[in-house]
Image: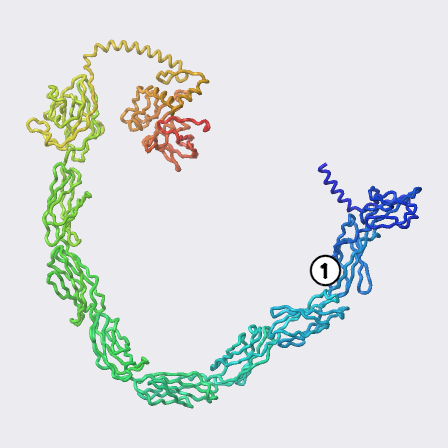
Amino acid sequence: MRRAAPLFFLFLLCLGKIKAAVSSCGEECSSLTDVRVSEIEISIPFPGSFRISNVTFANGTQTKPLLVNGSISELDPGTQYVVYFTNGNSTCCEVITTKPSPVSDLHVESIGTTTVNLTWKSEDLQAINYTYRIEIEGNASPRNESSDTTSAVISNLEPGTWYRFNIYPVAPDNKTEGEPNNASLYTKPSPVSELHVQSVGTTTVNLTWKNEDLHATNYTYRIEIEGNSSRRNESSDTTSAVISNLEPGAWYKFNIYPVAPDNKTEGEPKNASLYTKPSPVSELHVEGIGTTTVNLTWKNEDLYATNYTYRIEVEGNATRRNESSDTTSAVISNLEPGAWYKFNIYPVAPDNKTEGEPKNASLYTKPNPVSELHVESVSTTTVNLTWKSEDLHATNYTYRIEIEGNASHRNESSDTTSAVISNLEPGTWYRFNIYPVALDNKTEGEPKDTSLYTKPSPVSDLRVESIGTTTVNLTWKNEDLRATNYTYQIEIESNASLRNESSDTTSAVISNLEPGTWYRFTVYPVAPDNKTEGEPKNTSLYTIPSSVFNISVNDISTTVVNLTWKNSDLASVEYFYRINVSEGAGVNTVFADTSAVISGLSPGTQYTFSIYSIAGDMKTEGKSSSINYCTIPASVDVLMCEPVAKQAELILNWTPPNGTFVGFHLLVLNNPWNKTLSKEYNTTVTNLSYFTNYTVQVITRSCEKESIPKEITCHTSITDPPPPSDPPAVKALNHYSLNVQFGVFNSTHGPVTAYAIVVTTSEGPISNDSLQYTYDEFIKKKTNAYVASIIEVQQKYSSSSNSQQYDMKVGDGSKVYGYVNGKLDPLGSYRVCVAGFTQMNLNETIQLINVDKSFLSFSPSSGTVVLPQNPDVITGAVVGCVLAAVIVAVIVGFIFWKKRRDGGKNSDVPFSIIESKSMKVDHFDSYFKKQKADSNCGFAEEYENLRLVGVNQPKFAAELPENKGKNRYNNVLPYEFSRVKLSMKTSPFDDYINANYMPGYNSKEEFIAAQGPLPTTVQDFWRMIWEKNIYAVVMLTKCVEQGRTKCEEYWPNKQSKSYGDIIVAMTSEIVLPEWTIRDFSVEKVSDSMCICLCFLTWHSRMMYMWNPSQA
C-alpha cells in the first residue's frame, strides 16, 4: 500500500487535467426557466412545484453538495454538473456549469508605446482548463482578445492613449464566464524627434523639438537637466523650452521625456548635450618678454574654469596665427626679435568648440643679444670692441655699452656695431656689457659681455725657500697696484719634461717632481683672466733623492753581512749611496751600487745600518733609511755527552761561543725532549729510552736568532730488563727431568744477552741470592733454589718452530760455567723461574754470577710440577691393576651398550648417563611455574647439574697448536667424536672448525652447533655451510654484547662477497623487534638458499624464553 499511495496520488493529480466527458440527461426540463448559477451555488429562486433532488458530476460521479431550500452550494467553480429536478410526479435534469471565479493578482508586467503585457492568477480547481476573454476599451471602440494561459501581450495600441482591460475567465464549455477583473493605464508616448539647440549663452540654453503622436496635443514634457554635478527637472506643455540658471562653460545633458495625460506615464527620452559659453578672461598680464617668446598670464573666475583651454590669436610681423593652452598662462614662441605683436585670448569650453569673448594685449619682443663680440685690441688704458646683430629689424636698433671695473660703473652708447673704450686702469679687470635697444627705446635685449685685464708687471726677488724629494718652495714679489689679484704661471722644465702650474700668491710649492732631478722654474705673472701674462723670471736646482727601501740583510758569516736595497727614482741611475753602521763598526763609505758587503762584525750582535741617497750633483743628499739587524750567533765550540748508568738519561757539557748570546736551545732529534737555557753550559737529558742512539743539538740564541746547531750522537746505558708477565711452561719429561719453555724477555731496556734457569722447591718468590747457588748446594739442602743452566743468546739452542720461544731440559747433567744441570728426585715437587740479563757478570774464579755487577729481572715462577715415580718401583703393581681394569671395562662396556640400545635412534651418540624423573602431564604446568620462580632459579640448578656431563671426552683436534687460533675461547672446544670435519685442501689441519653435530629426533647429526666465526674462520664457516648443505643458520647472539665481540659479522650487506671460491649475496632482510631474517644466495657450482635468523634478544650466556605469541 505504501507504494500504491503515491501512484494513486499521481493519478488524482492527473485527473484534474483531463476534461470529463459530458453525459446527456435522460430527460431535459423544458418548463424550468429560472435557474440561477454562481461560482459555488445553483438555486431556483421561485421553485414552484419543482425542487432539486440530486446532483452528480458531468461524468456521472456522485457528489455530496449542500442541498438547502432548493439551492445547491459548496460546488466547485467552473465545473459541469448534472442537476436532477423533481415535482413528485416526474423527474428531469439539466447540465449546468458553475461560473469560474474572477481572476486575481492582475498585474501589468510591462507597458510599451503600442503593447501591454498582462499577467494574472486563478486558484480554481478547473482553472487549468479555462480560457480567458480580454475586453479592451479605449481609442473610441472596444475589442476582444483571448488567451488560454494566465498572461497576454496586447498589441496594436495607440501611443499615449488610455486603455482598460477586462479579464473574463471562461469555463471549459466555452460559454460560462466568470465575473471580470480589470486594469486601466496609459500607453507610453513616443519619444520626441528633431530635438534642436536653438541658442547657447553663458547661463541659458534654448531647446525645440517635435512629437507626431495622435494624442500629442495632450502631452506635457519633463526636461531632465544633468550637469554641474547635479540633476534637476523642468517642464513644458509646448515643444520648446528656455533653460536658465546654468553655469558658464559647463557641460549639460537635457533629456526630454513626453508625459501622457495621467502625468505618470512617460515615453523614452531624447537627449542633447552641450557646453555653455565660458566667461571672458580677466587680468591679462605680460609676465615675461623674450626675443622670440612672450609669457602671458590671465584669470577666469568661472566655476569650471579649471577644465577650460584657451585659444591665443597672435597678430604681428604681417602674419596671424593661433596657439592654445590648457592653463591660464601661455608661452608664445617662434616670434621675431624686436617686433610688435597683439595677443587675443579666447576661453574654450572642454568640448574644444564653445568659445567665450576675447581679451587682448600688445608689445615689442626683445632684440637678440649681439654676436661675435670681439676685443680688437687691448692696451694698458684702452679697449677696442666690435660686434654684430643678425635680427631682421637690427637696422633700427641702438646699443648701450655698460662698463664695469676699477670700482666704478658707467655707460656709453653707439648707433653702430663698434666702440673704443678709453680711460682704463693698467692691470685692471673690466667687463663690457652690450645691450641692443628696440625701436621703442625702452625694450632692451639681453646683454653680451666680454671681460679682460691689462698686462701686469714682471715679478722680482725670485728665491728658493726649500727643496724636498718631490717638492720645491718658491717665493717672489710684484709691486703693481692690482698685484694682489694676480695669479702666477710657473713653467717647470727638466731634462725630460715641460709642464705648468699656477699660484694665486707670491709663493708656490711645486709638487709631483721627480726626486734627485734637475729642474728650472720660470714664473709668469698672470692677470685674473688667467690669460694676460707679464714677462718671466727663472731659477734652477736639484730635488732631494728619495730614501732607499726594501733594505735586506743576508748573512755571509757570523761576522760578515751583505746589504742590498732599492731606489725606484727615475734619476737613481746617477745616484751614489753613503752607508753608516752603528755600534762602532767604523763603516761610513760611499757606494755607487745598490748593494754592499759589510765585514768585521761581531756574532749575535744588534746593528743599525743607515743608507743615504746622493743626487747627481754629489751634494744634494736624501734622508736615510735604516734597518736593525742581528748577526747570526756563533755555535758552541765544544759539545760533550755522557750516559748515566742504569738510567735512560744523558749528561751534556759545552763551552761558551764567541760574540753575544742570551742562551741556548737544546733538542733531541729522535725524541720529543727539548729545553731552553740562559747562560748555562750543562744539563741532563731525561725521558729517553735505554740502549738507544740519540742525536743531540745545542743551538746558540741571540736576539731571537739561532746559530747553526752543534750536534753530537750519544748512546744511553742499559738496565734491568722488564720482567715478563707469563711464567715458563714446565712439564715432567720423566721421573728425574723437566721440560721448560719460555719466551724471550722484552729488550727495551737493552738487548737480553743471557737467561738463567732457576729451579726451586719453595713456594715463595725467587731472590737475587738464588743466582749464587749451584746444584750441589741444592742437593745438600743448603738452599731451596739453584741455577740449573745458563742460556747465552748468541749461542744456538734447541727451540720450537717459533723463534721467540726457548725450550730446554732440566736434569740432563750438562754444565755451563760453574753451574751443573743435575737430575731431580722422583716424586719431587718443583717450580721454575727464568732470570733474564741485559748484562751478566761472572766471578772470574768460581764462574758464578756476580749479582752486584749484573742487570737482571725474574719471570713469575711456574706452577708446581710433581715428578712421577720411578718406573721400576711400579712395574709389579701394574700387572695386577691391568687385570682389574679389564674386568671393569667389560662390565662398563656392557652397561653402555645396553643403554645405547635402549636409547632408540640416537644410540650411536655417546652421552653420559643422566638421571631424570618422569612426571604426569597434568603436573607439568605447576612444575614449570615452580622452576621459573625466583628468576628461573629451579632451571639454573638443573643446568648446574649438567655442567660436568661429558667434559672429560677427548678434544684432540681442537687442542693442536695449529688449530688453537681457530677457537674463540680456550674452554669451549668440540669433542672429537662429534666434531664437524671439513674437506682437506692443502694441509692436514684444513678439516678443523669449532663446530659439533647435535642429535635430533631423526638423526644423531640433525643439527650443527658452531661458535660465532672469528675473522680468520669466516671462510671455513661458509665452506661448512656449502659442504654440509645447510639451508638455515640460527644466530643466538649479537655480534657485540656489553662491549665484547661475540661473533664476526660473517655476512655481506649491500654487495656480494667472496669467501674463497664461494660467493655470498644477501637477497632480502626483514628486521623485527626481537629477531632479523636475512636471505642469502650461496654460489659455487649450483645455487643454494640459506636463511639466517638473528635473535637480537638471546644474549650470550642466557636462556631464551620463548613467547608463544611470537610463533
Q: Quadrant of residue 1101?
A: top left
Q: Is residue 938 visible?
A: yes
Label 1: few (<14), some (14–19) or many (≥20) C-alpha neighbours in 10 Å: few
| Residue farthest along the right direction in this orientation | 89
Q: Is residue 794 visible?
A: no
Please give left or right for residue 355 compared with residue 145 in the image: left
User: Colour scheme in the image?
Assistant: rainbow
Q: How many marks?
A: 1
| Above or below, 990 relative to 540 | above
Please give left or right for residue 450 compared with residue 524 in the image: right
Foreground pick, 670 / 349: 349
Foreground pick, 650 / 973: 650
| Above or below, 553 relative to 439 | above
Please give left or right for residue 906 compared with residue 667 in the image: right
Q: Position of residue 315 (x, y in %)?
A: 54, 83
- Which residue is located at x 14 percent, y 59 percent? 607
| Above or below, 336 relative to 152 | below
| Residue farthest along the left direction in this orientation | 845
| Above or below, 559 relative to 567 | above
Q: Position of residue 1072 (x, y in %)?
A: 43, 33
Residue receiving disc 1: 110
Q: Quadrant of the N terminus?
A: top right
Q: Position of residue 1080 (x, y in %)?
A: 41, 32
SS label for mark 1: strand
Q: Amino acid at mark 1?
A: Ser
Q: Quadrant of residue 1089?
A: top left
Please give left or right for residue 1086 compared with residue 482 in the image: right
